[in-house]
Image: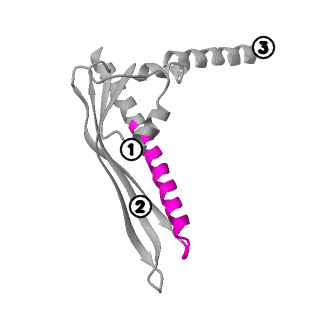
Amino acid sequence: MFQHIKTSLLIVLTSLALSACGFHLLGANSSRNLPNSIAIIGNTDNEIVESLKVQKPDSIMPTTSDKADVTLEFGDISTNRTVLSKTAVGTVSEYHVRLSVVIQAYDKHKNQLLAPTRLSTSRNLIVGTGYATAEDAEFERLNSDMARELANSIVYRVRAVWLTHQKTAL
């Protein structure tokens, strides 16, 4: 009997301790960690911005920079493909592919939330001999994957700076 009461009391105390530390809130209201509106300006005609628009939660409304909670500015975007190795006959067998973007973010009062930051990702692309069209298709697929990865990184950074901005504004 005493063991049953002791176990029940331990369960109640554990649940109270977890609820007191905010454990029950994990994921419950993640939208408060995001701005209500966002403007995307600058070099916006690229696959990174398109991936970002797809990943954007429905609760964030696109708007102009004068009305947005956060303005995300895209600067230089570069793609680079360098030869890593060649076959004995001189054809390329491996490339190093790199995609990078410079971004910065401001709040509605033009306070800088994120200083100009270069984000980049790279991959190695191994190609077979005699498959020029497959090489181009694989290069495009790899660029799309890297653009989605950079868009993901941008979402995480905007979420982090917005959360910090919200805490300092309180």
Residue contact at pointers 3 and 2, CB within 8 angstroms: no
**SS majority, magenta:** helix
Residue at numbered disc 3: 1
Is 154 on the left-hand or right-hand side of 4? left
State the separation of the CA atoms marked 2 and 1.
Answer: 17 Å
Is 22 part of what is drawn in magenta?
Answer: no
Q: Residue at x 26, y 20 (%)?
A: 66
- Left or right of 88, for residue 64: left
Dot 3 lies on which element?
loop
The spot of residue 137 in percent (x, y) is: 53, 59
Count of number-bearing discs = 3
Q: Nearer the viewer, mark 3 or mark 2?
A: 2
Residue wearing tag 2 = 97
Residue lying at 45% horizontally and 53% vertically, measured from the top left: 143
Q: Amino acid at mark 3?
A: Met
Q: Secondary structure at mark 2?
A: strand
Earlier sequence position, callout 2 versus callout 1: 1
Identity, as a three-letter code, of the amino acid under mark 2: Val
Indicate left or right for 99 with 136 as reference: left
Label 3 – label 1 distance at C-alpha? 68 Å
**119 to 21, vertically: above or below:** below
Residue furthest to the right: 1
Q: Which mark is residue 46?
A: 1
The magenta-colored residue range is 128-154
Vertically, is 89 above or below 54?
A: below
Q: Observer-nearest residue: 116 or 51?
A: 51
- Residue 44 percent across, percent down from the top left: 34, 39
Instruction: Choose between 159 and 135: the one closer to the eye.
Output: 135
